[in-house]
Amino acid sequence: MGNATPLPFKAISINGQLFEGPDMALAQISPADRGLLLGDGLFETLPVLKGQALLWDRHRSRLMTAADTIGLALKADQLDGIVSQMERASDETPSILRLTVTRGIGGRGLLPPNPASPTIMATLAPLSLGFPFQDVRLVTSQIRRNEASPTSTIKALAYLDNILATKEAEAKGAGDALLLNSAGRVASTTIGNLFMVQGNHLITPPITDGVLPGILRQVLLEEAPKLGLVAEERSIDPAELKKADGLFLTNSLRIIRRVTRLDGASLGLELSPEGPASTDIIVRLQMHMQHLIKELTGVSYGQLP
């Protein structure tokens, strides 16, 4: 055990049993768990700020909807109990909460056990308050997102396409990869939803184009009118992106990230008073979200330029 790689967590919970400190090495998942063997499961990731899981009610709703989609029986009160347990374990220090739910232990073959007994694992990892709002460069991946698959709109465990696309982006000096769907339309990136700025319009692809219904995506669609902006969901042709006034990504941990380059081409977004109007819109959105998060948690999350 002395030579084991240290776990990158502050705490682990498995089916409500909490492990902290050296006891985390005792946390175990069965070798017969379908999440491990088949990727048969779901997950949610969100920040915990001052002992509060940010927008947990929305994450719980999405998780329960996804569980219904794959036919996995979950109890909302059990999820709430585990999240509350991890909120306490955070000791009010900024943390990343990942909640992983699998169909649990099953026999050989693809058909799930009936009834299934889900495995619910939660982990807490340290979170830097400077993590969100960082600029990002994108490259378009060769990997396509299948908008006809039910897994394109849920946070399923099988993330190999996203992993390979991320490796592709890293090899090209970018921080994330843009994923098109099988029809060649813009879908998302490996870890976020994409928004295009055109004048005072914020345009993002519809869920039917193979898009995860992101939590921050939905919040921005609701909050945009408060800033005098028009939010619009419609299909986006990749050629539109380089002609846009600006691009940004949304994600529950990184909140809003401005895209500065796409496939090596500069988008001309310089942070200065003389910069383009789109930059002002993106900064206004970042400031608005930072203010909203502080109202909810009391924490000033992220450092804006």
Image (cartoon, grey):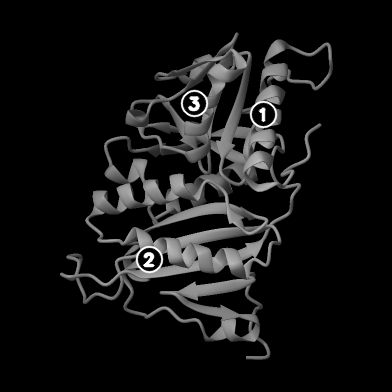
Kindly check if marks 1 and 2 are in contact, taking CB atoms under 8 A apart as contact. no
User: Sequence order check: which comes first, mark 3 or mark 2?
Assistant: 2
Residue 171: give x, y in percent of width and height: 63, 45
Disc 2: which residue: 78
From the top left corner, tell me how far across and down residue 257 is, in percent.
65, 34
Residue extending furthest toward the top = 199
- Can residue 101 be seen here? The reply is no
Q: Secondary structure at mark 1?
A: helix
Spot the residue most to the right: 273
Rate crowding at label 1 as few (under 14), some (14 to 19) or many (20 or more) other CA atoms within 10 Å: some
Q: How many angstroms separate mark 3 from mark 1 (CA)?
A: 12 Å
Q: Is residue 52 above or below residue 190?
A: below
Which tag, 3 or 1, sits closer to the chain's start? 3
Which residue is identified by label 3?
Answer: 222
* Disc 3 from disc 2: Cα separation: 29 Å
- As drawn, is 172 to the left or to the right of 115? right
Query: Crowdedness of circle 3 by 10 Å Cα count: few (<14), some, many (20+)?
Result: few
In the image shown, does 109 or 278 lie closer to the viewer? 278
Q: Position of residue 104 (x, y in %)?
A: 31, 71
- Residue at horizontal 57 percent and vertical 35 percent from the top: 250
Q: Which residue is mark 1?
A: 288
